[in-house]
């Protein structure tokens, strides 16, 4: 360690400034720590019941959030709060939250490790794989992989689908097809509205088994 007595006067002043900036008094709480505590309070009081603390919801009614893209999660939370995406439950849960809290929640769930999932119906999943990777040229359905990636991991703007509850995916596709999903509907309606009941179920089962 440098001896301050051997430094020139300007360097002594610089060293003192560094100490003042980076030494935190005992018991003091920094901003990021306080923010993290607030985020975890929200997770434990509002999110955990439906989505689990680590984003691995036990019920197929609720989406798995683990490893979801933070930008996508933040946007969905904002849409629920601001009325662009309709859900009485979610709108109530987030109505008083701020954008920085959404960012913290999104960061938390995006860094959780998704659990391993196994396809429940191999035959149905095979049909779903064909649709996911190649689409259906006869009905005009494009391959899901063209937007969400070959592994279903999505992008910063498009959701990660891999490992999602098949039942939840099926419900969302049907809502897109009927325009009952009130946000992000422009492209997805044109896709989902062309899927048959069998195709909707098959592609959902296949995606649910992706890692």
Image (cartoon, rainbow, N blue to C red):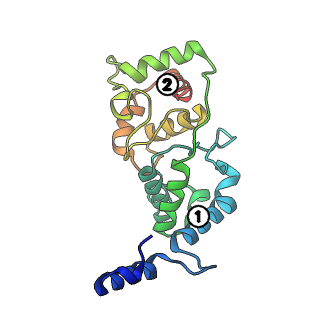
Q: Position of residue 151 (x, y in %)?
A: 43, 28
Q: Nearer the viewer, residue 127 or 111?
A: 111
Within-10-Å neighbours for mark 2: few <14, some 14–19, many 20+: many
Q: Is residue 140 shown above or below 84?
A: above
Q: Which quarter shows the N terminus?
A: bottom left
Q: Is residue 86 shown above or below 32?
A: above
Residue at the spot 42% in from the left edge and 20% down from the top edge: 131
Within-10-Å neighbours for mark 1: few <14, some 14–19, many 20+: many
Q: Nearer the viewer, residue 42 or 59?
A: 42
Of the numbered discs in the image, which one, if any, rests on residue 182?
A: none
Q: Position of residue 208 (x, y in %)?
A: 56, 29
Q: Is residue 76 left or right of residue 13?
A: right
Q: Is residue 60 left or right of residue 140?
A: right
Q: Earlier in the sequence, mark 2 or mark 1?
A: 1
Q: Name the element at disc 1.
A: helix
Instruction: Identify the residue under disc 1.
Output: 39
Disc 2 and disc 1: Cα gap in Å? 34 Å
Residue at the spot 35% in from the left edge and 21% down from the top edge: 139
Q: Residue furthest front?
A: 6
Residue at the spot 59% in from the left edge and 42% down from the top edge: 64
Q: Position of residue 71 (x, y in %)?
A: 41, 53
Q: Is residue 108 shown above or below 8?
A: above
Asked if residue 150 can be seen in this view, the reply is yes
Q: Name the element at disc 2.
A: helix
Residue at the spot 56% in from the left edge and 44% down from the top edge: 66
Within the image, what quadrant is residue 4 found in? Answer: bottom left
Q: Position of residue 156 (x, y in %)?
A: 38, 46
Q: Nearer the viewer, mark 2 or mark 1?
A: 1
Instruction: Identify the residue under disc 2.
Output: 203
Q: Nearer the viewer, residue 45 or 20?
A: 20
Q: Is residue 31 shown above or below 189?
A: below
């Amino acid at each position: 360690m440098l001896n301050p007595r051997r430094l020139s006067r300007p360097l002594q002043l610089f060293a003192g400034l560094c100490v003042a900036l980076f030494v935190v008094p005992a018991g003091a709480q920094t901003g990021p720590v306080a923010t993290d505590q607030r985020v975890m309070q929200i997770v434990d009081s509002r999110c955990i019941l439906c989505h689990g603390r680590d984003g691995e919801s036990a019920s197929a009614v609720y989406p798995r959030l683990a490893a979801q893209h933070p930008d996508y999660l933040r946007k969905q939370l904002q849409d629920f709060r601001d009325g662009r995406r309709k859900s009485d439950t979610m709108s109530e849960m987030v109505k008083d939250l701020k954008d920085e809290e959404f960012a913290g929640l999104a960061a938390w769930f995006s860094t959780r490790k998704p659990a391993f999932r196994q396809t429940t119906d191999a035959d149905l999943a095979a049909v779903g794989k064909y649709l996911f990777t190649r689409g259906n040229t006869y009905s005009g359905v494009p391959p899901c992989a063209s937007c969400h990636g070959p592994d279903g991991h999505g992008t910063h703007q498009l959701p990660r689908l891999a490992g999602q509850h098949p039942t939840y995916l099926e419900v969302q596709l049907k809502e897109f097809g009927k325009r009952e999903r009130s946000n992000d509907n422009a492209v997805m309606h044109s896709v989902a509205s062309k899927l048959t009941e069998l195709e909707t179920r098959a592609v959902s089962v296949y995606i649910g088994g992706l890692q």
